[in-house]
Image (cartoon, rainbow, N blue to C red):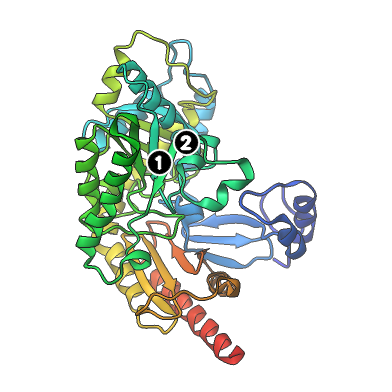
Amino acid sequence: MGGQVTNTGLENKTTAYWQALDRAHHVHPFTNHAELAAQGVRVITRAEGVYLWDSDGNRLLDGLAGLWSVNVGYGRKEIADAAYRQLLDLPYYNTFFQSTNPPAVELAAKLAEITPGSLKHVFFANSGSEANDSVVKIVRYYWNLCGRPEKKTIIGRRHGYHGVTLAAASLSGLSFMHPQADLPLPGFEHVDAPYWFDHEGDMDPDAFGLHAARALEEKILALGPDRVAAFIGEPIQGAGGVIVPPASYWPEVQRICAKYDVLLISDEVICGFGRTGAWFGCETLGFTPDLMTIAKGVSSSYVPLSAVLLGERVADVLSAADDEFAHGFTYSGHPVACAVALENIRILEHEGIVDSVRHKTGPYLQARLRELADHPLVGEVRGVGMIGAIELAADKASRTRFDPDLKLGVRCRDHCIEKGVIVRAVRDIMVLAPPLIVTEEQIDRIVETAQSALDTVARDLQQAA
């Protein structure tokens, strides 16, 4: 392609052209813009299956599924057709003023069918951040309606990620996000994550799971149960470094929440829609929440869509309030987004993709990744289903990390991208979450490229010593 693309409307425009425009006008999320301006942005122009192409014609295997989210892979004509049909029939109408549209109604019913427990009521939003911001308001409103307005504090976890709005970032336990906006807001607290390798690598995992869960109980007691409204967590913490809790952790968390009358929220933005080998991560990890937030995989990110799922306990109180629910978005229940999500879920069901992750490709990915556990740079390999992490450590036995200034995770990531495989670096962790349709052959390429990155960085360290 020689620096050009052939997409309709984009002919004769070069990488340099887009980089110059981007540098002049585009503010990127989570980006050091001085660094970006110096090196130039990567311009992605098309995609199909698990592959992306950039504006220079390079093909990249997308080992992160966009942003943990393109579950059914790229280029699904069925989804494009569903969007097109809906755009012709009803491109938009709001769900305010006692109005609705057929795709929103049908998607709400479908979500009620596939979600666990009593999560049968759906509020639609547009992003995971909006869903988690909304769940904060719903929780506070619920306790106000219950006549317990003092129950306001929501507890999250360190390394947790729930979004970037003021409330969602306050829920999040990624501390680097907080100083720029003077966060967290009042009413948000955090406890340690169930990060076995980081905290208690010498403790039996199940014993550590109970230990980590009881940090929540200690926090509830310290704050006072009458002040604690809810606990929120990702079944598996994604952006915080793919932190997989021991099997004992989530059932103990659920017991503690029930004991102290604390609502339990499962943030399924990353784990939902098949990534863990079940429809939702809470099913894999063995707990049933009172509320659930979803996004990403609900539409495979073909269009923005998110939602809050309410269990009967919360929904019944809100429904009986005889009071206007003073919350909503222009695009809540957008008909095109809902039509896309319905087709996306149909594909997941019809092609047996979730079952394949559970029984075939997920176990294969986990087995291949664990072949890297003995590498001298690797402290731990962990993951579930179609999500994995390779954590680097200077000494595996003592769990001693490398000097962060070496940026070994970033160096491994960059090597993988140079070799045509996209992975993510979180601290000194290589993180991956490919589309759920990835084949065993493509998994082999991801793992072999990660191995090459580890070997290259190890050689560089030896030469620098």
Q: Looking at the picture, how far across and down is residue 289, in whole percent?
A: 27, 38
Judging depth in this view, the residue of 352 and 428 nearest the camera is 428
Above or below, 342 against 331 in this view is: below
Residue at x 31%, y 59% (from the top left corner): 385
Label 1 is placed on what type of residue? Val
Q: Quadrant of the N terminus?
A: bottom right
Q: Is residue 142 left or right of residue 95?
A: left
Q: Looking at the picture, how far across and down is residue 138, in whole percent?
A: 39, 25
Above or below, 351 against 293 in this view is: below
Q: Is residue 341 left or right of residue 276?
A: right
Mark 1 vs mark 2: which is more N-terminal? 1
Q: Looking at the picture, how far across and down is residue 304, in whole percent?
A: 51, 38
The answer for how far apart the CA atoms under marks 1 and 2 are is 7 Å
- Whether residue 235 is visible, yes or no, is yes
Q: Contact, CB < 8 Å: mark 1 with mark 2?
A: yes
Label 2 is placed on what type of residue? Leu
Where disc 1 sits, the SS reads helix
Where disc 2 sits, the SS reads loop
Image quadrant assignment for residue 198? bottom left
Residue beneath disc 2: 305
Image quadrant assignment for residue 101? top left
Q: Quadrant of the C terminus?
A: bottom right
Residue beneath disc 1: 298
Judging depth in this view, the residue of 173 and 115 nearest the camera is 173
Q: Is residue 113 left or right of residue 412?
A: left
